[in-house]
Structures are given as structure tokens and as C-alpha cells.
Image: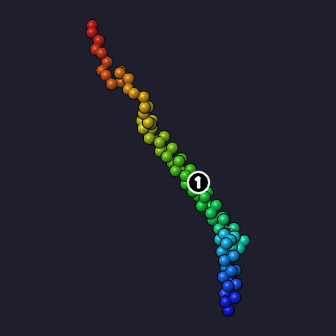
Amino acid sequence: MHSLLAATVLILAEEAKKPLIMRLDGAMRAKVLAALAGLVILGFLMIALTWLGARMTRRYMGPKLKPLSSAPARDDEWTRPPEEED
């Protein structure tokens, strides 16, 4: 009885060493891999659509929202122009 139990445990231990994907039959393995590939493609598609949507929104909003340059302001940008004397 113990030898049968030991043999069963040994067979199950050998079977557990294989990755789960390799323990599946060929048709089920193909379905699982196709589903994973579909999820990866769907993820890239969502990223691309988000990027395109953000780009279109940015263009629709116009140039007024473009980031300002980080250069310091010049004197003539914040002071009043001198008054002309006649």
C-alpha cells in the first residue's frame, strides 16, 4: 500500500515540475497562448488610442496651452515702455 502511495506521489511530483502551460494538451495550449497574445495586442492598442486622443485634444485646445519656455523674463516683458517726451 505504501509503495503505491509513494509511486503516486512520485508521479505527481514529476508532473508538477513541468510548467502549467506544458501540462496542457495542444489545443488548450494554443487557446491560452492566443488569449495572452490578444491581451498584449489589446494593451498596445489602448496605449496608442490614448496617445492619439491626447494629441488630438492638445491640438484642438490650441497653442495657448503650450508650455512656456523656462527662460527668465526680459526687462521689456514686465516693465512699462518709457513715455515719449515731445
Task: Give the colour scheme shown.
Answer: rainbow
Q: Which residue is nearer to you in this view: 65 or 4?
A: 4
Please tell me in which quadrant of the rendered image residue 44 appears.
bottom right
Q: Is residue 68 above or below residue 23?
A: above
Residue 79's spot in the image, x, y percent?
Answer: 31, 22
Residue 41's spot in the image, x, y percent?
Answer: 61, 57
10 Å crowding of disc 1: few (<14), some (14-19), many (20+)? few
Element at label 1: helix
**Residue behind mark 1:** 44
Q: Is residue 55 above or below residue 26?
A: above
Residue 32's spot in the image, x, y percent?
Answer: 65, 68
Q: Is residue 9 above or below residue 80?
A: below
Q: Which residue is nearer to you in this view: 33 or 38?
A: 33
Question: What residue is rendered at 47% in x and 42% in y?
Answer: 58
> Which residue lies most toward the bottom here?
1
Please tell me in which quadrant of the rendered image residue 8 appears.
bottom right
Residue 50's spot in the image, x, y percent?
Answer: 52, 50
At label 1, the amino acid type is Phe
Please tell me in which quadrant of the rendered image residue 9 appears.
bottom right
Question: What residue is rendered at 60% in x and 58% in y?
Answer: 40
Is 69 positioned to the left or the right of 24 in the image?
left
> Is residue 5 at all visible to an observer of this figure?
yes
Question: What residue is rendered at 31% in x and 18% in y?
Answer: 81
Q: Is residue 3 above or below residue 12?
A: below
Is 57 positioned to the left or the right of 83 in the image?
right
Q: Which residue is nearer to you in this view: 16 or 45?
A: 16
Disc count in the image? 1
Split into 4 quadrants, where in the image is the N terminus?
bottom right
> Which residue lies most toward the right here?
26
> Is residue 28 at all visible to an observer of this figure?
no
